[in-house]
Image: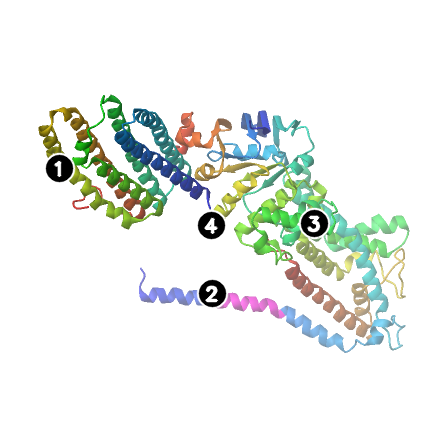
Amino acid sequence: MNTNAHVKYRIGKSRGFQGLILTLAFACVIPLLAILVYIIKAGITKINWKFFVNVPKPVGEAGGGIANALLGSFIIIVVASIIAIPIGVLCGIYLSENRKSKLAYWTRLCVDILQGVPSIVVGIVAYFWMVKPLGGFSALSGSVALAIMMLPIVIRSTEETLKLLPDTLREAAYALGMPFHRVILKVIVPCGMSGILSGVMLSVARIAGETAPLLFTAFGNPYLSANITKPMQSLPLLIFNYATSPYNDWHDLAWGASCVLLIFVLVLNISTKLITRKWKVQL
Amino acid sequence: MESTIIRSIDYNAYFGDNHVVKNVNIEIPKNSVVAVMGPSGCGKTTFLRGINRMHELIPGATAKGKIMLNNEDVMEMHPIFVRLKIGMVFQRPNPFPNLSIYDNVIAGYKLNGIKLPKAEKDRIVEHSLTRVALWKEVKDSLTKKGSFLSGGQQQRLCIARAVAMEPEVLLFDEPTSALDPISTSTVEELFHELKKNYSLIIVTHNMQQAARVSDKTAFFYMGELVEYDETKQMFTNPTDIRTQNYITGRFS
Amino acid sequence: MTQLENEITSLKSEVISMWNLVELQLQKAKTAIVQFDRDLAREIVLKEKRVNAFELKIDRDCENIFALYCPVAIDLRFLLAVLKINNNLERVGDIAEGIAKYIIESETVFDKHVYDVTELLRMFDDSISILVDARTAFENEDTVLARSLFKRDEILDNINKQAIDRVSGCIKENMEVMKDSLYIMSIIRKLERVGDQSKNIAEEIIFFVEAKVLKHQKGA
């Protein structure tokens, strides 16, 4: 019965529901804002030029910095990317081009499972694969561990991006007499570049803050080092070690490093969004 | 005496075990427009795609028989060589969205890694766009992306892209079914011009279009070539009762 | 120009060619009577085959255009008009042939006095001029000119009506001209039908240009 009162009740219910959704949406934003505000407030005062350029000093001496962690994070991430991106993108291309084959089915399954493997387990696996045979901790083994974590994200986003490209694009390329590798490299990948790029950047943002895999692979290093066959410091490791230490100087370093890491990840996420929008190809 | 450019001899096509094109024997004359019509699922598109070896790109698709392009068997040649001589235009206009109009026209060369001097590239672009009556409309915006054109213009751009490769035969797979009526008639006018230099085969589900544009018409039904004749004859007095039923709309 | 426009243009020029041929047949018939040229008359009979061939070709061309292009509006009306005009012109051709056959059958020259009295030559001139004007109206899609033809047909009707009395008068005066008079009577009847055919053509022209149907209207 559609009486006036009943209709008013339904309108009111609808408005209430909309209000509830809005409230809950904002509720999700609050933790993020809280973290940002707290960390930046705590860490920004510790950051100065010396902070970026110096290595940590022994306890008691002032003026330590996180230079070794910055360099270390950079090197480990770059090496991990060099390992993961080619493999991941090519695998993603394979999966998007072969939707129905058996190998593709099992590969997809494995990738999904890999995504769910806990990061500490990946670290332990890398320990047994790389650290033990090579006889020592090294940045390389840390990169391998992180690369394993990057792979599922890169593969999945590449595959999803390329799957979204219409078949007519491939057909047009084939009809012009292009061989398979050119269809992929000159047509499909360029058109899907924004999606692939965003997948890569998101995977980097993900591993930038991973601590557990590096615990028994890169291990950490108080000195500035660029040797990937030796242990290396990284931002998350430094934060972990120094925050749990009993020294105030080191606590300060940890706050500063947290702030730097947070800002880095934030900037990476935002620029991913901007770049994808700019590069997105109008189909 | 008409010369034949494409002759199919006992051509059969399958999707797995599904026999979709059955023993087609047809001769396409040079510099003419041949329309291929028939109800949905009759095998006409499959046959068309078989001619430039696009059929086998679908997983599980196979084909038997011969298709002679002049004196060479297309089924024996490497597909890439076939597609350089036989171009194709698809139902939905599909210019490469990341390339400019200029680059789209010479995409067949550029993306295949064939290097040409700039003067030659300019000539090809102007020539191809003129052939499809698009040059005047876009000559001042050649660097813009192809996806900003209207549907009819995009389709003509795709035809220019195919024409730029100087093929002998042009295949059209329902080229105007995604276009509005004005763009459709612009593209249909093109066919009369294009047949002076190329041989055209057009698959269409619109029989009025087949009547308007073609010199000869082939009628496919359930995978078989039922009738193939001069268009005038086909539409005034077809030989086979199935053809007559289809044309007069008595098909169930 | 689209393909359909091309086809219609060439159909139009075919109809005009047939028209020219038929007009020429009538002109020759008139000349053949005045000069009593039997050979010219035989030529007219031979050329009638060409008139028939035109009729068949125009019918076939119309059929093809209908089948291939599904014309609508003015194009549809044009084709329907052409089909009928085609028939009308073919009948005028038959009339010219019939007149020519009379000349061939007749053993003697027609008596000049009879055809002066009956205004035979004037009837020829008028009927040919109506046919020619109908052609002009068709070519230029001129419905004003087409409408003027209705009145002019009445002149032919008048001459036809007066012919019986005039011919009887001639026969009473001179029994020798009986045969000639009968031939001339038939020729006048035939020429009156040329006027009727031209009137029908004018109706078709008005139909295709204005989509107005004037057939079977009183006073049209």
- Check disc 4 and report the residue beneath it: B182
- Check disc 2 and report the residue beneath it: A17
Q: What amino acid type is highlighted by mark number 4? A: Ile
Determine the chain carrying the residue at label 3.
Answer: B
Q: Residue at x 25, y 25 (%)?
A: C103
- Check disc 1 and report the residue beneath it: C162
Q: Specify the quadrant of the image occupied by residue C6.
A: top left
- Check disc 3 and report the residue beneath it: B121
Q: Secondary structure at mark 4?
A: helix
CB contact under 8 Å: marks 1 and 2: no
Q: Specify the quadrant of the image occupied by residue B64.
A: top right
| Same chain shared by disc 1 and disc 3 | no
Total numbered labels placed on residues in the image? 4
Q: What amino acid type is highlighted by mark number 3? A: Lys
| Same chain shared by disc 4 and disc 1 | no
Determine the chain carrying the residue at label 1.
Answer: C
Q: Residue at x 65, y 27 (%)?
A: B73
**Residue count near mark 3 (Cα–Cα under 10 Å), binned few <14, some 14–19, many ≥20:** some
Q: Is residue A20 magenta?
A: yes
Image: magenta residue range: A16-30
